[in-house]
Image (cartoon, rainbow, N blue to C red):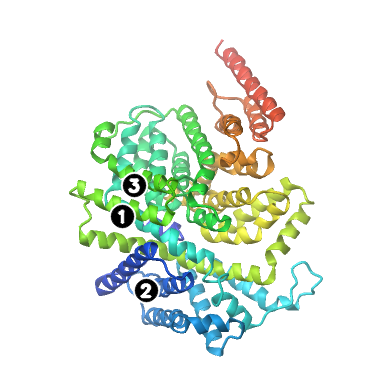
Amino acid sequence: MSTTADELIAEYDAERPVRRLTGWVAGAVTLVALGLSLYVLWWTFFPGAVQPYRIGFLAVVLPLVFVCFGRDKRRPSVADWLLAALALVACLYPLAVFDEFIRRASEPTALDVAAGLTITALVLEGARRTVGWILPAVCLGFIAYAYWGGWLPLSWPIGHKGYDVDRIAVAFTMGTDGIYGVPLDVAATYIILFTIYGAVLDHSGAGKFFVDVSLAAFRRSRSAPGRTVTLAGFLLGTVSGSGVATTVSVGSVAWPILKRAGYPREQGGGVLAAAGIGAILSPPTLGAAAFIIAEYLRVSYLTVLLYAIIPTFLYYLGIFLAIEMDARRYGTQPVTVDAPRLWPLLKRFGYHFSSLFVIVILMALGQSPFRAVVYATLLAFALSFLDREHRLTPRRAAEALAAGVKSVLPVAVTCAAAGTIVAVVTLTGLGLKVSSLIVGLAGGVLAVTALLCAVAVLLLGLAVPVTASFVIAAVIIGPALTKLGVSSPEAYMFIFYYAVLSEVSPPTALSAFAASAITGGNAHRTMIATWKYTLPAFLVPFAFVLTPAGEALLGIGSPGQIAWTLAASALAVATLAVATGGWLAGPAGPVERVLCAVAALLLLVLSPVPVLAGTGLAVAALAVHLILRKRRTT
């Protein structure tokens, strides 16, 4: 990737390392990261006690954060080294006296409290360096609420008895609901294994192959450039795991093609951003928050993948339909691309797909996701020797393993910081209190409650990364939905989609801003274009929670019910594409577009009568369009 692309990722992606280390410092960091990756792989097959593992994981990650992140982009300062040393000592202290440390959680010593407060402060500072000041500020707000909330009248909905410093420190570092809770556990198990897998896959040449196969798949047609970008985003997302990184990686290659085809800058940026976040919403990897869903629901990761299949199909159906319409609206032209032919390319390098299938197959056969991804990583490593240019020699393999660990640093420290919020919510009962406020504000109406929850998650996502916004929303906003009868899978998937969609939502829209930086288009118009492409993803989650057949969109229900729901929702996406894209057999006028918009909303109710009404309106829109089109041509 070019330096320019790296700089764009550093600017717009809150979860990417930015310090470029050189010399012995770079070597030392690589060596430590390599050691952690090998330890994680070993622990997958020979697991021990969970809590010491989480503590040890943070004891390595947190010092690495202070070395890899900071104001100076090239080398750590003396203060960075001191903070790294302090983080190592503070995190190792609980391990040194682990049995006694856990037993005296009800009566901590002054040293226990000091260590807990130090770890908390260092985690928040690490979060500030990696994802900005907003997440630590939110965490400090929750800490202040835990400490000073006792001053609030108990009659107030969010009042509580108040907790002293000792009790807060215990909740943060001496239990399983704080810094060492589920979010960090997910980062230390699921996420790091998948980032290692992605790094090995990338170092084996898969990233280049995914771009080449996308270019070769769609040859000469007016919509081929848009389709190529979408497919490339989906495939590259399995390697990068980041919406912004995927947008920039695809954009650096594909924007010249879109430009030659005749795409306006803003529309081209919209396609790039929509393709970039698509992989975070899609199997087989999804985003980091999907692993947390599996832990919260106590289901397998494969089950979460199955939840996402139909929404993923609908998301890409909407994008492909929008691309077809835009290709006609803007009169785009076929573009000749210097790329290998598809079948020879697949025959030579198609083995890169095999490890992706292995993950799903092994999980379907009952293997844990941990072992499945490790086996897939080993397969990707072995297959790399089929390509002389990208074979993973010992040196390159070590670099790949270390790169996987470096990629997880921002996510891990974000998860640790989010753990402080989970601890406060658990300690004070804030989740149930806030959910009661939301339900009360909505008057107990599920539709209004869902709308308020969606807005709250989007606003939260504007301030903090996707993983943190999901964790916060799951413990605070999720209970508002479940209190009104929404099942846990529906509620968590609703929150997950809106947490991800915050990356393309005004006013920040990180993926859209990154795309506009590549195309040179207006950032705000690019956001609007992105919103048009991703609109189905904004509406379909409401069908999860508001309609009787909503669970069928997650693959829960009888085959007949799932098929019927899929057909109705696919027609809804198609009519929605007409309403936003303004095209049927030709340019669609206001009447057809309004009819299609109403039809889409009725179809997404997913009940027989509204679906029939929506189908009727869609047919009426087509009839009106054909009649008016015939009149215009005569």
> Which residue is denoted by mark 1 in the rendering?
200
Give the residue type that dot 1 points to: Val
Observer-side mark, 2 or 1, equals 1
Q: Earlier in the sequence, mark 2 or mark 3?
A: 2
The answer to which image quadrant residue 130 occupies is: bottom left
**Label pair 2/3, CB-CB below 8 angstroms:** no
Observer-side mark, 2 or 3, equals 3
Name the residue located 52 percent from the left edge and 52 percent from the top edge.
503
> Marks 2 and 1, how far apart in space?
23 Å
Question: Could you say which disc has been placed on residue 355 in the image?
Answer: 3
Q: Is residue 197 left or right of residue 575?
A: left
The answer to which image quadrant residue 209 occupies is: top left
Q: Within 10 angstroms of label 3, few (less than 14), some, or many (20 or more) residues?
A: many
Question: Could you say which disc has been placed on residue 67 in the image?
Answer: 2
On the image, the x and y values in percent for residue 118 come to 51, 81
In the depicted structure, whether residue 13 falls above or below residue 122: above
Residue 107 seen anywhere in this rendered image of the structure: yes
On the image, the x and y values in percent for residue 147 come to 67, 78
Give the residue type that dot 2 points to: Val
Q: Earlier in the sequence, mark 3 or mark 1?
A: 1
On the image, the x and y values in percent for residue 229 come to 39, 39
Residue at the extreme bottom of the image, as rendered: 110
On the image, the x and y values in percent for residue 45 come to 37, 62
Disc 2, SS: helix
Disc 3, SS: helix
Observer-side mark, 3 or 1, equals 3
Residue 465 seen anywhere in this rendered image of the structure: no
| Along the viewing direction, whichever of 297 and 256 lies nearer the viewer | 297
> Marks 2 and 3, how far apart in space?
33 Å
